[in-house]
Amino acid sequence: MVELSEAAARLDLTSSGVGIAALVVFLLAYAVVIGEEYLHLRKSKPVLIAAGIIWALIGWRYAQAADAATDPATKLALTQFAEQMVRHNLLEYAELFLFLLAAMTYINSMEERGVFDALRGWLVSRGFSLRSLFWITGALAFCISPIADNLTTALLMGAVVLSVGVGNPRFVLVSLINIVVAANAGGAFSPFGDITTLMVWQKGLIPFTGFFALFLPSLVNWLVPAAIMSTAVGAGRPAPITDQMRLQPGAFVIVGLFLLTIAATVSVHQFLHLPPVLGMMTGLGALKLYGWTLQRAAIREIAVRTERHSVDSDNPFEVVSHAGAEREPFDVFKRLEKAEWDTLMFFYGVILCVGGLGAIGYLESLSQVAYGGFGATKANIAIGVLSALIDNIPVMFAVLSMQPPMDNGQWLLVTLTAGVGGSLLSIGSAAGVALMGQARGTYTFMAHLKWSWAIALGYVASIWVHFLVNGALFTGVAVR
């Protein structure tokens, strides 16, 4: 097969009718996503359609260009470019999809085994107030996300908040926003905390320990809005628990498997230089295998109960009912069914839509205008604001593709802003999108938007702290 140059095949469609039409389609789709709570239309539907339309427009334009080309090599390059770009985006989505599917399955399994109900019971029994629980869940999200990742952390802590805050939607809403901000902030100072930090680290622009310089700015980014939002929680206490909370068999083992899966995911990438999703899927396989042992044990227990009942019963024709059994045997495939499929499909649409805009040339043009016209500092701050509207992964990818000459301080600045800027809107980060699906009807775009001003204060404060504590890194010398 002929090796093709992407640069030679790429067409600049930014000012063409196809490019403008694709941009309009994308903006309309996002407008529908924003109005989800008013339209009662799942957020995945508009972006799925938009992705298909955008790539159909791109494919049609490249087919036209290929038909008009006279050189065989050029014709081949134009014919295959759109297909190669779509496949590249599909590969990115496949890794994200499988990673999320494994994480969601673990979360659902722990929920089914009563882990979050037990944690809720422990928190309530300790006498913590709602305000204390607000700070505890936020602090846990900030501390866990550098080790796991902001998305998995948000799902985990979100499940705890939904369990603790039963019957208190106001507490649930503010706590979930707090978790999104804390998880994104915590993920910004670790190479494993977010995909954007991972991309910067893989490029060799910042050493592994260099990201820790962002700890204090990240902490400020969370504490400022958290302090403001905590005033809306109130000093009440969660509803008392009337039901007896008891962990189901295998609960601790599943939690242990989840921690081992996270460790394996980090190790697979750190030491074997393989995609992190490989560790997550291996962990999912371990969960499925352990689920099989749980299922077999439950079936044997039911058989023993049935036999014992038939022996003790005076009526040999009595029908045995297992309605009194605590719950049905563990089935990992039912936990897979409960994954948030609307969120997973939404990510497909977003990645394909933004990938299409990148293929048209909009992301590259935006980066050139920003760094060429405004300078590195203003551009990097704007990158964070932009990441609240467009997924931070393609935005950071565009910056890394340009490789603008920046010192370590500026590379850390764009890492910080791209990581925490997504907290400004609920659709700006994977953590926010996932919790919108997990707490549908309570945590919405408009509900998050009401607190965006407080989050923006934290965003500005974190940038100021970065310049204050890491000023020595701003040398003005380009990093090569």
Image (spheres, rainbow, N blue to C red):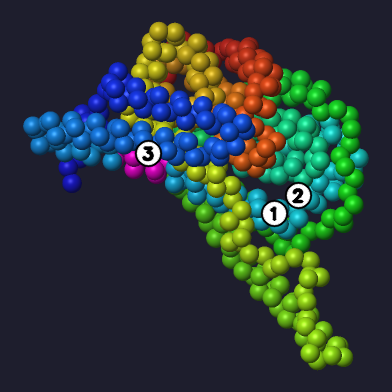
The residues bearing labels 3 and 2 have C-alpha atoms spaced at a distance of 39 Å
Q: Residue at x 23, y 40 (%)?
A: 80
Residue found farthest to the front: 39
Considering only order in the chain, which callout, 1 or 2, is on the residue closer to the N terminus? 1
Considering only order in the chain, which callout, 2 or 3, is on the residue closer to the N terminus? 3
Residue 125, position as x, y percentages in the image = 90, 46
Residue 139, position as x, y percentages in the image = 74, 33
Whether residue 191 can be seen here: no
User: Magenta includes 17?
Assistant: no
Q: Which mark is residue 110?
A: 1
Q: Which residues are magenta?
A: 84-92
Considering only order in the chain, which callout, 3 or 1, is on the residue closer to the N terminus? 3
The residues bearing labels 2 and 1 have C-alpha atoms spaced at a distance of 7 Å
Mark 2 sits on what residue? Answer: 116
For the C terminus, give its image quadrant: top left
Q: Residue at x 90, y 52 (%)?
A: 242
Mark 3 sits on what residue? Answer: 52
User: Magenta includes 89?
Assistant: yes
Mark 2: amino acid: Phe
Q: Secondary structure at mark 1?
A: helix
Q: Residue at x 66, y 70 (%)?
A: 295
Mark 3 crowdedness (10 Å alpha carbons): few <14, some 14-19, many ≥20: some
Mark 2 vs 1: CB contact within 8 A = yes
